[in-house]
Image (spheres, rainbow, N blue to C red):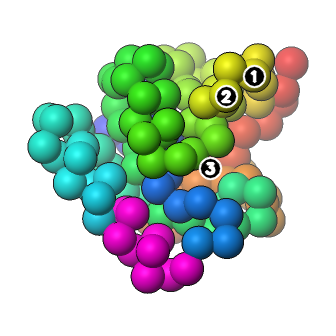
Amino acid sequence: MKDLDKEPFVIVSAKTKNQSDIETFRQNHALKEYLSFHGYRYKLVSGRYNGEDEASFLLPNISEADALSIATLFNQESILVVDENREARLVFTNDSEPTSLGWFTRGESKDNFTLDGDIKYICTGAK
């Protein structure tokens, strides 16, 4: 993420809970195609959210509204929004209040993390 040090970004996934590996593969392919077709830049990352391993898409400089529309289209419950100062929020597609997660930074965790290559990022220091 070194090349994204100052850019705000959103992380979105196409995986849903209890989805088969085949369906996850199809959904990830569909999301990749959707992003490419609509001209969004993205970077593939992986991680874990609420105990589920998942491939995810890091989208630099996308509006929160656009990211939420994509997440809703792919039946996601939330997106991770990180601003240029690296403050992170979990924003929900069901109109629940966003949750402040603190800062997106390198760290160790067994759950709720993002892997970019071999570097693990977590959210820490929630307000």
For label 2, the residue is 94
Secondary structure beneath label 2: loop
Residue type for callout 2: Asn
Q: Is residue 3 above or below residue 83?
A: below
| Direction from residue 98 to residue 86 in the image, left or right | left
- Marks 1 and 2 in Cβ contact (< 8 Å): yes
* Residue 1 falls left or right of residue 100: left
Q: Secondary structure at mark 1?
A: loop
The residue stretch that appears in magenta: 20-28
Q: Residue at x 40, y 50 (%)?
A: 57
- Dot 2 or dot 3, earlier in sequence: 2
Amino acid type at circle 3 is Tyr
The residue sitting at 75% across, 22% down in the picture is 96
- The crowd level at tag 3 (other Cα within 10 Å; few <14, some 14-19, many 20+) is many
Residue carrying label 3: 121
Q: Examine the rendering and report whether any part of residue 47 can be seen.
A: no
- Which quadrant holds residue 41? top left
Q: Position of residue 68 (x, y in %)?
A: 48, 28
The answer to whether residue 83 of the structure is visible from this angle is: yes
